[in-house]
Structure formats: C-alpha cells, structure tokens
Amino acid sequence: MTLEARYREACARADLARGRLHLTAQEAKARVAPARLKQDVKDKASNAVLNGVATAAAKAQQRPFAVGAAVAAFGLFLARRPLAALFRRLYVRFQDTQSDNVENDNG
C-alpha cells in the first residue's frame, strides 16, 4: 500500500467519523431541546398518574368497604362546618322547645 493510498483511506475514515460526530451532535441537540424535555416530563407525569389511578382502582376492588369508609370519612371532613351548623341549629331548636314547656308567663 502506497503512502498516497493510506493517506486517502485515512481521509475517508476522518470524513466518516466527522459525519457520525455531526449526526450524534444533532441527536443530542434534539434530545435537550426545551420542547422535547417539556414533552418528556408531560409524558412521564401522565404515565405516573395513570399508573396511580390503576393501582388505586385495583386496591378499591380488593377492599370496597374500606374504600367506602375512607371516602365517607373524607366527605364528613369536608362537610364538617355545615354539619356542625346544622347540629347547632337542631340543638338550639330542641332546647328552645323544652324551655318553652317549662316556662310560664310569670317568668
């Protein structure tokens, strides 16, 4: 192999390596683009939420009474103020009814 042939072969290998480097750089640039990163985060978050929902549904099917009790407790927690107001009104109404029977016109 002559010196000139080895030189041409080395130039061809260098051109191939330069082309591969250029393609790799373009792929890396596309991977770290803000839109791509944003889409990846959205995909991972939606997959995590869907997996969580599927797991919760499977657990709910295994223990329906426990889930029902937990949902009822949570509902009571959310409605604690209106329920407390209702019971206060009922208590006052019952107390007033009983006090009306005990009192007379003279005091």
Image (cartoon, rainbow, N blue to C red):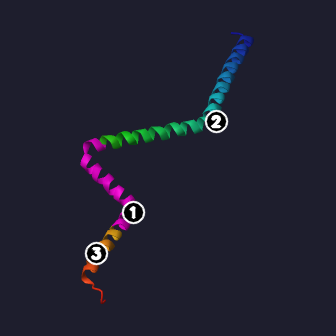
Quadrant (top left/top right/bottom left/bottom right) for the N terminus: top right
Do labels 3 and 1 touch, CB within 8 Å? Answer: no
Magenta-tinted stretch:
59-86
Q: Earlier in the sequence, mark 1 or mark 2?
A: 2
> Disc 2 versus disc 3: distance between alpha carbons?
74 Å
User: Going 54% across and 36% down the picture, which residue do you hit?
Assistant: 40
> Disc 1 versus disc 2: distance between alpha carbons?
51 Å
Quadrant (top left/top right/bottom left/bottom right) for the C terminus: bottom left
Residue to which mark 3 is pinned: 97
Amino acid type, residue under disc 3 in the picture: Thr
94 with respect to 53 (left or right): left
Residue to which mark 2 is pinned: 33
Kind of element beneath mark 3: helix
Q: Residues within 10 Å of mark 2 (few under 14, many from 20)?
A: few
Q: Residue furthest bottom?
A: 106
- Residue 97 placement (x, y as % from top left): 28, 75
The tag on residue 82 is 1
- Residue 45 placement (x, y as % from top left): 49, 41
Kind of element beneath mark 1: helix
* Figure quadrant of residue 20: top right
Do labels 2 and 3 touch, CB within 8 Å? Answer: no
